[in-house]
């Protein structure tokens, strides 16, 4: 009798865990990540899955409490006060193929309201809405490649003929250079390219036989 009860309890626990995994799997198909999702996004997922699962099971499987869900359920049932500005942000963002970030989208959206004689929205409001809509420029971000001398030589290594002997007794006997790494923007392809420029000063110092170090 005890063994049968323990088996039944284990089956119920496994069924409950299986149900939670199925709910989380369906939720991940809609928002991608439960850890990074906001309470509003989770509430929207719960509302979408209400026809398939019970509310109690959804609350237990997803990282949200019943009170927080009820708050967002009531708020989502009301008309969105930011619907118009969101549409204009999307219009500007898509018109430039995602090349514009918050700093460039903000003045264009504000200019739309000014041209209509209306009060322009605050730049912080536009920034908050763009973050909520996951709209950010990905064309011009951090450097895609950074020079690292610890990786060693990547090409043919020249012989060290100078060997720090900088002194010279005649002009143009020894030429030294300094290599500088610069960033250049390709306007057509909009990609980063690294270019190297160098100069070649002389080691011979004129009247003195001893060069500059």
Image (cartoon, helix red, strand yellow):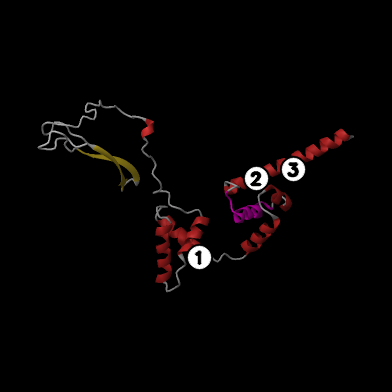
- Along the line of sight, the residue nearer the viewer: 196 or 109: 196
In percent of width and height, residue 88 lies at 46, 62
- Using the numbered discs, state the Cα–Cα distance from disc 2 to disc 1 in whole angstroms: 32 Å
Q: Which mark is residue 24?
A: 2
Which residue is most to the right?
1
Within 10 Å of disc 2 (Cα), the crowding (few <14, some 14-19, many 20+) is some
Q: Which residues are magenta?
A: 36-50
> Is 35 above or below relative to 179?
below
Q: Earlier in the sequence, mark 3 or mark 2?
A: 3
Residue 120 visible, this orientation = yes
Q: Are marks 3 and 2 in contact (CB under 8 Å)?
A: no
Residue 52 visible, this orientation = no
Identify the residue at image location x=70%, y=44%: 20
In percent of width and height, residue 130 lies at 49, 57
Q: Earlier in the sequence, mark 1 or mark 3?
A: 3
Which residue is most to the bottom?
117
Apparent side of residue 31 relative to residue 115 in the rendered image (left or right):
right
Within 10 Å of disc 3 (Cα), the crowding (few <14, some 14-19, many 20+) is some
Q: Which residue is mark 1?
A: 84
Verify whether residue 63 appears in magenta. no
Q: Which residue is mark 3?
A: 16
């Amino acid at each position: 009798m005890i063994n049968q009860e323990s088996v039944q309890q284990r089956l119920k626990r496994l069924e409950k865990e299986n149900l939670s995994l199925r709910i989380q799997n369906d939720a991940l198909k809609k928002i991608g990540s439960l850890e990074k999702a906001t309470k509003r996004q989770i509430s929207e997922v719960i509302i979408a899955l209400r026809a398939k699962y019970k509310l109690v099971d959804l609350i237990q499987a997803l990282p949200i409490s019943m009170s927080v869900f009820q708050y967002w359920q009531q708020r989502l049932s009301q008309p969105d006060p930011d619907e118009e500005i969101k549409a204009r942000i999307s219009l500007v963002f898509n018109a430039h193929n995602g090349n514009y970030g918050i700093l460039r989208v903000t003045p264009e959206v504000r200019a739309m309201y000014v041209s209509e004689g209306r009060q322009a929205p605050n730049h912080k409001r536009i920034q908050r809405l763009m973050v909520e809509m996951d709209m950010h420029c990905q064309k011009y971000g951090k450097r895609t490649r950074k020079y690292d001398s610890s990786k060693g030589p990547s090409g043919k290594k020249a012989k060290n003929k100078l060997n720090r002997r900088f002194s010279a007794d005649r002009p143009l006997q020894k030429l030294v250079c300094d290599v500088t790494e610069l960033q250049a923007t390709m306007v057509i392809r909009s990609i980063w390219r690294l270019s190297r420029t160098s100069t070649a000063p002389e080691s011979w110092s004129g009247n003195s036989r001893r060069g500059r170090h």
